[in-house]
Image (tube, rainbow, N blue to C red):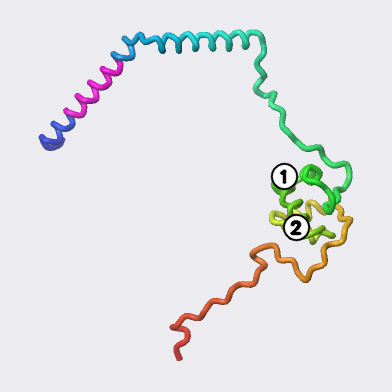
Amino acid sequence: MGTPAERKALLFFSVVLVLGASTRAYNTLHSRSPTDARARSALERQITAADSARRAGLRKPKGARKQRTPPRPVGPVDMDIANEKEIEALRHVGPTLARRIVADRDSLGPFGSIEGLGRVKGIGPSMVAKLDSTVTFSLLPRPTNRVISRPSELPKARRKPHRRDMRP
């Protein structure tokens, strides 16, 4: 089991625990404070109101939650002039990607082609292939030498050679 000192400590903690629990139970059962009576009556009123609403049929059924889905576009969407809602209506495009597309177009100019759309973060080759038949481009892209939009396209910094590599 344990040493005599450990047994005494265990006995002491168990007595304190039992005394604390019994004191708490006694206070809970024998308290008649006015706040408890007010709280009980308020709870009873809420229960009665909920039961009457349930009986009256005012409660919405659990499966009646309406999901918000944007309407599907009728024809191809012009990505150079479309707003967020029209872009979000495209298949495989959510609200975040639609916002990114509009922000990229506003800051860097029109896309001009499906390849220009690829500069948006989150649109890779597979997304370009999915969107190819549902999008069009009416404007010319902004003339630039080269658009660097992703950190992976930036040139890598050259590392300084280590001292051990410089030895003859």
Please name whichever residue, 96 or 130, is drawn nearer the observer in this view of the structure.
Answer: 96
Q: Is residue 133 visible?
A: no
Q: Confirm whether the magenta stretch covers residue 59.
A: no
Horizontal side of residue 67 vs 160, given as left or right: right
Q: Tag on residue 94?
A: 1
Tell me where residue 52 appears, x and y as whole percent. Answer: 61, 8
Q: Amino acid at mark 2?
A: Ser
Residue behind mark 2: 107
Q: Which range is magenta?
A: 12-25
Q: Is residue 143 visible?
A: yes
Q: Residues within 10 Å of mark 1 (few under 14, many from 20)?
A: some
Give the residue displayed 79% in from the left and 61% down from the top.
116
Horizontal side of residue 157 vs 7, given as left or right: right
Q: Quadrant of the N terminus?
A: top left
Give the residue displayed 75% in from the left and 57% down from the top.
107
Label 1–label 2 contact, CB within 8 A: no
Horizontal side of residue 38 vs 32, given as left or right: right
Give the residue displayed 47% in from the left and 80% down from the top.
162
Q: Residues within 10 Å of mark 2 (few under 14, many from 20)?
A: few
Q: Secondary structure at mark 1?
A: loop
Q: Secondary structure at mark 2?
A: helix
Magenta portion: prevailing SS class: helix
Q: Is residue 108 above or below residue 71?
A: below
Give the residue displayed 58% in from the left and 12% down from the top.
50
Q: Amino acid at mark 1?
A: Gly
Return the residue found at the far front: 34
